[in-house]
Image (tube, rainbow, N blue to C red):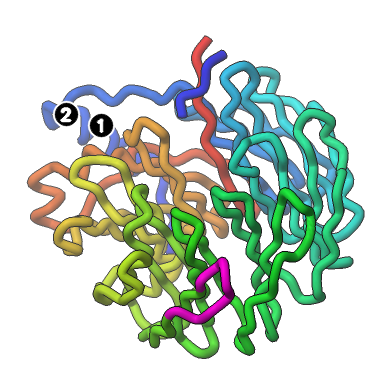
Amino acid sequence: MRVVNGSSISRRGVLLSAGALLGCGRRKATGFPGYCFVASRAGRSVAAVDLNRFRLRKQIALGAAPAAIVAYHDPERPRVFALAPDAGMVYEIDVATLAVSRKAQLGGQGATMRLSPGNDVLWALCRDPAALVEVPLKSFRPARRIPLPAGVESLDLSEDGRAAIGGRKGGIPIVSLARGAIERTIADKAEATLLQFRKDGQLLVVGNAPERRLTMFEVATGKTVVRLPLAIGPRHFCVSPDGGQLFVSGDGMDAVVIAFPYRTEIDQTVLAGRAPGAMAVTGTSPAYLLAANPDTNSVTALDMDTHRLVAAIQVGRGPREIALTPDNQYALTINETSGDMAVIRLSTLLEPWVRRYKSAPLFNMIPVGDRPAGSAVVGFEG
């Protein structure tokens, strides 16, 4: 097995849209050899959606409510990990068997998790008691437990082996993963709503929603580099593949803010549909910034070069997350309210009639379970 790295929509409408696409003389769509795994909180399960045939393959029962999914792209044995926060449990799901293979009890209420840069450790952030828990993939048993101050909510890992912990007022702990200890605490009186290491690991970008600002800190010293006022209260970050652009959406304006982490400055603020939330950046040419608009049950596509609107695509009710297939054929929108996944064929955005009318159809719609909360795409062959 090899890894390759609003209003509801009726099924009839989706099929008509797909048929219209195929009737326009374009190359027939092909599936992606892999799965999209979607956490279903109300269903206490993980849905495995076959992206070759675009259908639900299996609901994998967990016995607890998952809220996050992380993929492990192992050439020999691809897996995904599902975090059930209230149960304090991480479930390993084998992609080949579509079954739970191992479990890890964290010893506290979970908040979020990240896979280490070396892909050998799962780091889980616990709220109560507050701690960063090391789960080596080889044993899949909790190892080191790094105590943290109370009030933690968010986590990011740098390529050089550090963790930044956000959520609390009064400071941002920077943890050395090698030493298993807090290296320093960056002084910041504001709440760290969001945080993101710059790609080189030398800078930490922190979003504060109540104060509507971005602050950039030097990781090695903890010194403030710059404080940048925003037109919105940041709630979502999205980084371009090269790390050169940071997209910020949030409260207060129907727009996305574009920041340059290496220049440590704001580039511009662009309109991106009604109350944009979660975002994704495609690896296509041209590249698109996709922004979910939960208030209008749509996804807005912006041209990355011009930052102009390409199209608005109606998806299911309450889109909360956008995932991309590694081959950049499809964008997958996870709709929290309607409990389904909308499939957008990205090549459709190149059609002249789409750009003229600023509207694009869906390729497919697939049920995934009640209150989906997170997703991860895993490809395979064999």
Image position, residue 300 (x, y; %) = 30, 60
Q: Residue at x 50, y 57 (%)?
A: 201
Q: Amino acid at mark 1?
A: Gly
- State left or right for residue 301 relative to residue 367: left
- State left or right for residue 131 relative to residue 78: right
Residue 274, image quadrant: bottom left
- Work out which quarter of the rendered image holds the N terminus and state it: top right
Indicate which disc residue 23 carries: 2
Q: Residue at x 45, y 60 (%)?
A: 198
Circle 1 crowding by C-alpha within 10 Å: few under 14, some 14–19, many from 20? few
- State left or right for residue 319 relative to residue 18: right
47 and 131: which one is in front? 131
Q: Is residue 129 within the magenta segment?
A: no
Q: Amino acid at mark 2?
A: Gly
Q: Residue at x 49, y 55 (%)?
A: 321
- The span from disc 2 to disc 1 (Cα, nearest Å) is 6 Å
Indicate which disc residue 77 carries: none
Q: Secondary structure at mark 1?
A: helix
Q: Is residue 118 above or below residue 162?
A: above
Q: Which residue is mark 1?
A: 19
Q: Residue at x 70, y 25 (%)?
A: 94
Q: Secondary structure at mark 2?
A: loop
Q: Which residue is at the far front?
A: 221
Range shown magenta: 218-225
